[in-house]
Amino acid sequence: MDTIFALATARGKAGVAVIRISGPRAWVAAEALAGNLPEPRVAGLRRLRLGAEDLDEAVVLCFQAGASFTGEDVAELHIHGAIATVAAVLQALGRIDGLRLAEPGEFTRRALENGRLDLAQVEGLADLIDAETEAQRKQALRVLSGAVGQVVDQWRSKLVRAAALIEATIDFADEEVPVDVSPEVLDLIGGVAQDIRRELARLSAAERIREGFEVAIVGNPNAGKSTLLNALAGREAAITSEIAGTTRDVIEVRMDLAGLAVTLLDTAGLRETDDVVEAIGVRRALDRAGQCDLRIFLLDQDEIPLIQPQDGDLIVHGKADLHPVEGLSISGKTGQGLDRLIAEITARLSERASGAGVMSRERHRDALIRAIGALESAQDEVLRGGERAELAAEGLRQAARALESLLGRVDVEHLLDEIFASFCIGK
Ligand SMILES: Nc1nc2c(c(=O)[nH]1)N(C=O)[C@@H](CNc1ccc(C(=O)N[C@@H](CCC(=O)O)C(=O)O)cc1)CN2
Ligand SMILES: Nc1nc2c(ncn2[C@@H]2O[C@H](COP(=O)(O)OP(=O)(O)OP(=O)(O)O)[C@@H](O)[C@H]2O)c(=O)[nH]1
Ligand SMILES: [Mg+2]
């Protein structure tokens, strides 16, 4: 097994930077630079040297195999975060025999291989590193802490019990089975299937929290959409002008609304047009807005809407400074009504976010759907009764396998490269 090392903190000038070393030669390598090492888990101040040359004054922290993040021997060098110091220490480590730079996610990959984390926790860790808002942080931390494993293990133990009951009827096939176990078996399977369906229904909300909700501003040309986007973003992200048909491309702005990640989209004003480029813009506007979680339909008092708002659209009256009206009336120019608009958007998205479960990815959706399919066929076989018990048991095994793939306990080798590709170096 190679010993790997990498900068664990972000690149660039900083007060302190941490270099992490993991593998069988981690302590030897740290010792080569720091001299005698502190006891495991006790920080020690050491002068790092390469031959006669001083590299830095650093805090050194060691973890023993079996009691470390990766499960291997780990040494951490907490050094000064100067670009030159980091470069010098990394270069020194690269010269030590048996050491090489870690690949993205390789520390976490070792943690997975050594059973310190399951696959869902690895995904949770990736999400935690990517978290930019409170809702993302909380959701990721829950998953990193093993929430998916907890639910899956509950389901799995019920399926194991159902399988055991069925196996008993198979073993007793020639004799008289003392009791008909099928009601209890159906009860167990039905309960798990219902839980899985509930988790599936909660998955899209968790997915939105993770990826961010999309909110589009739509309406007539010149309604003030780009001015509204800029006012909400607090910067001139989109070009505005008195010429109708100014915006053509979809302009995206990332925002944090009450802890939710939101991408706000400005779109081309919707109208029939002979201008080829504008027409492409209108098509894009309709396509993207159609896929969004929420549409803000901005009405311009002087104009009748050329395209009607749809059910669920948040209807907003613009240019309130010129003509205030009843209802949600705002001005991108003066800022009036924007607090109410933000509160309304936040309320609608928070309502959706409150339905989030612990599973949040397409991979999870696939596994849950496969598990349900297997459980339904097991249910059918139990209902048919008799010698079909073997098939029912097989359905339960398949369901259990689908659930275990969530945790990476069954062949997921082909998924790993994809999952770890999104990690940064040093994680
Ligand atoms: N300095 C430092 N801080 C860090 C990390 C790190 O690697 N180094 N982490 C990196 O992500 C996070 C903490 N995660 C960690 C997870 C497990 C273990 C660990 O040693 N686990 C052992 C012992 C557990 C115990 O003592 O309770 C184990 O699980 O057996 C350490 C850090 C955030 N802060
Ligand atoms: N008085 C007033 N003028 C506004 C307001 N919002 C926008 N305007 C003006 O209306 C004109 C159009 O604004 P934009 O924000 O470019 O409108 P748009 O909806 O993005 O237009 P297209 O991109 O062409 O679809 C500009 O002259 C703005 O200054 C507002 O709240 N009050
Ligand atoms: Mg515009």
Image (tube, helix red, strand yellow):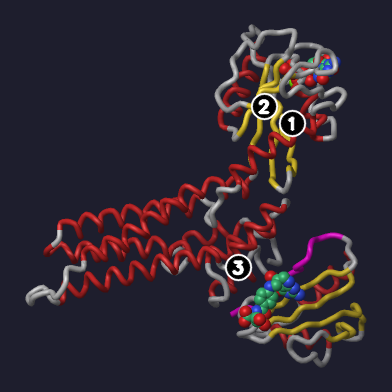
State the extent of the magenta-drawn residues as a range: 1-12
User: Left or right: where does residue 76 sit relative to residue 187?
Assistant: right
Residue at horizontal 67%, vertical 87%? 64
Residue 4 drawn in magenta: yes
Q: Earlier in the sequence, mark 2 or mark 1?
A: 2
On the image, which quarter does residue 174 sit in?
Answer: bottom left
Would you say the residues marked 1 and 3 are in contact, meaning their CB atoms lie under 8 Å apart? no
* Image x and y of residue 391, in percent: 20, 62
Q: Gap between marks 1 and 3, in whole Å?
A: 36 Å
Residue at horizontal 72%, vertical 51%? 133
Q: Earlier in the sequence, mark 1 or mark 3?
A: 3
* Number of residues whose C-alpha sits closer than 10 Å to that of mark 3, classed few (under 14), some (14–19) or many (20 or more): some
On the image, which quarter does residue 401 sit in?
Answer: bottom left
User: Left or right: where does residue 83 sit relative to residue 97?
Assistant: right
* Image x and y of residue 382, in percent: 20, 60
Q: Is residue 22 above or below residue 226?
A: below
Determine which residue is flagged by label 1.
341
* Number of residues whose C-alpha sits closer than 10 Å to that of mark 2, classed few (under 14), some (14–19) or many (20 or more): many
Q: In the rendering, which numbered label is found on residue 145?
A: 3
* Image x and y of residue 58, in percent: 87, 79
Q: In the rendering, which numbered label is found on residue 18?
A: none
Q: Amino acid at mark 3?
A: Ser
The reply to whether residue 399 is visible in this rendering is yes
The reply to whether residue 100 is visible in this rendering is no
Q: In the rendering, which numbered label is found on residue 296?
A: 2
Q: Amino acid at mark 1?
A: Leu
Q: Is residue 64 above or below residue 336?
A: below
